[in-house]
Image (cartoon, grey):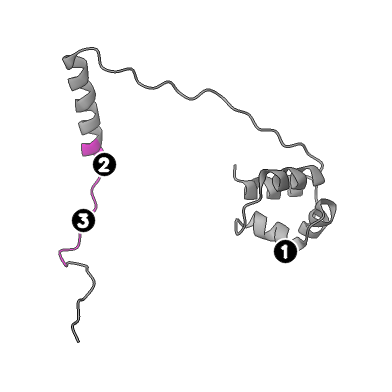
Amino acid sequence: MTPAQLIKAVRRRRGLTQAELAGRAGTSQPVVSAYEHGRRDPTFATLRKLVEAGGERLSIDASPAAPDLAPATSPEEHAERLLDVLSLADAIPSRRRSPRLRAPRLVSG
């Protein structure tokens, strides 16, 4: 969820207008609108302030990343992985390119 989506969701859950949320957070309605429409990105402190002004609590969670793939232990395993990658690349449809070259025109004066 983006900060914009979060601010809008908190505000709507609490039945607040942008002006009401802005008043509670000590900012203006145009600023809240800019955050909700993604025209501005709030800092973490500002996001927390807006969420708390909406009567909710902001929490952040972290989880371990997926472990890296262990190196291949044999040439056969390496070859299998390479074939998997190449098969995947073949499965991706390619875009047809225009036969016409698109480049800037060079004009001498």
Q: Position of residue 52 (x, y in %)?
A: 79, 42
Q: Residue furthest left?
A: 99
Q: Which residues are magenta?
A: 89-100
User: Residue 90's image quarter?
Assistant: top left
In the displayed structure, 103 sits above or below 51; it is below
The circle drawn on residue 92 is: 2
- The alpha-carbon separation of the residues under discs 3 and 1 comes to 44 Å
Q: Specify the amino acid type for callout 3.
A: Arg
Q: Secondary structure at mark 1?
A: helix
Q: Dot 1, crowdedness within 10 Å: few (<14), some or many (≥20)?
A: few
Q: Specify the amino acid type for callout 1.
A: Pro
Asked if residue 88 is among those painted magenta in the image, a careful observer would answer no
In the displayed structure, 65 sits above or below 36; it is above
Total marks placed: 3
Q: Nearer the viewer, mark 1 or mark 2?
A: 1
Q: Dot 2, crowdedness within 10 Å: few (<14), some or many (≥20)?
A: few
Name the residue beneath numbered marker 1: 30
